[in-house]
Image: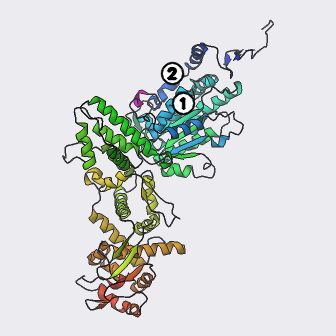
Amino acid sequence: MTGPFAGAHDFKTGDNTFLTVEGNYFDYRTAPPLPGADSARQLLVNERTKSSHPVLRPHIAAGALHNSEDRCDTPKCHPETRVAVQNSIVAWAAHNALVADSNPKKDILWVTGPAGTGKTAIAGSVAETCSEQGMLAGAFFFSSFSGDARRRLKRYLVPTLAYQLIRHECFQGASREVELAIGRDPAIFELRLKDQLETLILGPSRASHQSRAPSLSDPKVVIIDGLDECEAPPPEADESTSGKYVHRRREAPRTNEDEQVEILEALLHMANEPAFPFHIVLFSRPDPAIRRFFSRPTTKIFPQIFLGNQYDPDSDIALFLRAKFAEIRLRHPAIPASWPSEEVIKLLVERASGQFIYAATVIRFVDRPSRNPQLLLTQVLETGIPSDPDSPNPLAPLDLLYTAIMSRSPDPRLLATWLAIIEADLKKGAYTSVGFIGWSVDVSPRPAFFWRALLSSYSGEADSLLENVSSLMAIPPCDDFNTEFHFYHRSFGEFLNSPRRCTSLYVSREMRDSLLQVRAVQVLKGNGPAFSLAATEEAMVFYTRFLQVFVALKVFCDAFVIASLKADLLACDSSWWMQKLSEVPGLTYVGQKKTSGLIYPCIGGAELNVLPEIMGDLFQDPSGSFVPVLLGTIARS
C-alpha cells in the first residue's frame, strides 16, 4: 500500500478509536463507540462469527442458556429480595482483570448453600443483571429435571460456552480459530473436556488476546449453575450428538461425581489461563465431591458465599410472601386486604427456616385457578397435608426434592433410618430422666460424633451414608466431638415423620428402635463402637453419651427380651461396663436399693463389688422380666 497513510494505524480523534485494518483482521480498541455504531459493529461481529455457528450449533445445549425458552418459567428472585447477595456477586464479577491487585488465582467464586435456598433463582437473576450491563460472557444452567437431556451432560458445556463467547466483540478474532480447529479435528466433541477446552476456548482466547488489547467494556463473567445436577451417561451407554443413547463397552462407568470433578478441573484450568479474561461464578449445592475440590490447598483460596442467615433470608421470604399474596388478592377481589394476617406471614416465615422453596411451594399450592385461596392457605396452616387422599400434597415439590437427594445415598433406606433416629433425638434436647427403679441422669445433647459411632456397623459407614445429604443438614467434621447435627429446614423433619410424604423411605418407630437396639448390643458386646476410639477425648465423649442415653431410653430396656440378641448380651463384660457407668457425670441413684430381692448399685458404694457375681444369673433369667443390673435401670422415655 502506498500513500500518506501507509502503515499508519490506531488513529484517534477525541475520545474515539478507529479500527486497525490488517488483511481480514478487525481490531476494536477500548474507547466507547461513536453514537449509533453499536449495531454496525455487531453486524461485523456477526459476519465474522456466523461461519462458526453452524458447526457448533448441533453440539450445544441451547436450553442451558440463561435466556433460553427452556428456562422461561424458571423462578427468578422476586424484586427487592436477595438484593444483598446479588449485589455481592455482581460486584465481585465487575472487578476487572485490569485492576493492579487482581489475582487470577481467585477468579472463581463458589456460591453454595442448602437445598431450597434459591441458588438457581439467584443465578438467573445475576445472569440477567450481568447481561443487561454487558458483563455476561456466557452461562450454562445444568438441570436434572429438564426435559432436555443435554442440560445434565458434561459434553455440552464447553461447546455451549464457546458458542456464546464468539458472539462477543472481544472474542471476534477467535471465531475463525474455532472454525479451523473443528475442521482439523471434527471429533473434538467426543474428546475429554480438557481437550475440548483447549481447542474451542483457550487456544482461540490466546489468539484473540495477542491481537487485541482488553477493554473496560468487555464482558467479565461466566456463570455456571447447578453443577451438582450434572450427571454421567447411563452405565454401558454414551449419548450421541442426536440426543439418543448408543451402547458402548466400558470397563468402569463414570459416576456423577467423576463428571463434576472433571468440570471443576476444567474451570480451574480456565481460571489459571492468563489469556482467559473472565471471572467464573459457580452455583451448586455443597455436595461431597465439590466440597472436597474447594478444600484443596490450591483451591481453598477461592472466595465462597454460603447462603445462610447472614443474608437475612427471613426478611426476603416475608417480602416475597406479602407480594405474592397481594397478587392473589388482585385476582380475587372478594378477599379482604387484611388477608393473610401478619401473624400468618410470621408463621410461614418460621416454617420456611430460611428456605425459599418452602415459601414458593406454599404460594404455588394456594394460588390455583378455580380454588378458594383462603381455604387452601388454612389447609396448609392447620394440617400441612390434605386429609382427602385424593387431594394434592401442597408440599409435593419439596418432598420430591428431599426424596431425590436421599436416593443418591448408597443405601437410602438405612440412611432414612439414621435420619429418623437423629431427628427424634434433636427434638428431645437436654433433659433429666428418672428411671422407674431409681436412677436419675442428666442427658446432655448428643453430638454428631456420638451418632456416627453408635449407628455405624463398620468404619466409614457414616461418611458413605451422609455425604450426599449435606445440602439438607449440617454435618460436623469427624474430629468435632461436641457439635450436633442440624437440619437446615424444619419441614425435613416433618417429611421424615410422615408416611404419606416420605412414602417408600418412611421409617416407622419400630424400625428405628430395632436398629438402635441392635447397634447398642453390638457396642455392649465389643466394649465400644465398630471403629476404634483413638483419642482420650473421643472415648470419654462416646462412653458418657452412650451410657446416659442407655439408661434414659426405654427402647434399650426392650432389647433384653429380644431372643435374637440374648447371646450377644451374655457375652458382655458386665464388670467393665459397671466401671464405665461409675465414671458418668450427673448419674445418681435416688430410689430404693433393693427391688425384687436384687441389689442395685450405688455409684461409688461397696455394693458395686457384688455385681459381677449376679450378672450372669440376670442375663440367663428365662422370663426376661428383670431389668439388668448391668446399668442399674433403664428409664421410661
Q: Is residue 596 left or right of residue 72?
A: left
Q: Secondary structure at mark 1?
A: helix
Instruction: Quarter of the image for the C terminus: give it.
Output: bottom left
Colour mapping? rainbow
In this view, 559 is above or below 98? below
Q: Earlier in the sequence, mark 2 or mark 1?
A: 2
* The one of 122 and 180 positioned closer to us in this rendering: 122
**Residue pointed to by mark 2:** 54
Q: Which quadrant would residue 148 be assigned to in this image?
A: top left
* The one of 617 and 330 positioned closer to us in this rendering: 330
Residue 524 visible in the displayed image: yes
Q: Secondary structure at mark 2?
A: helix
Circle number at residue 365: none
Q: Is residue 437 left or right of residue 448?
A: left
In percent of width and height, residue 38 lies at: 59, 16
Amino acid marked by disc 1: Cys
Q: Which residues are magenta?
A: 68-82
Crowd around label 2: few <14 · some 14–19 · many ≥20 (10 Å): few
In percent of width and height, residue 466 lies at: 43, 57
Residue 231 visible in the displayed image: no
Magenta region includes residue 101: no
In percent of width and height, residue 122 lies at: 47, 38
In this view, 499 is above or below 583? above
* The one of 286 and 49 positioned closer to us in this rendering: 286
**Residue pointed to by mark 1:** 130
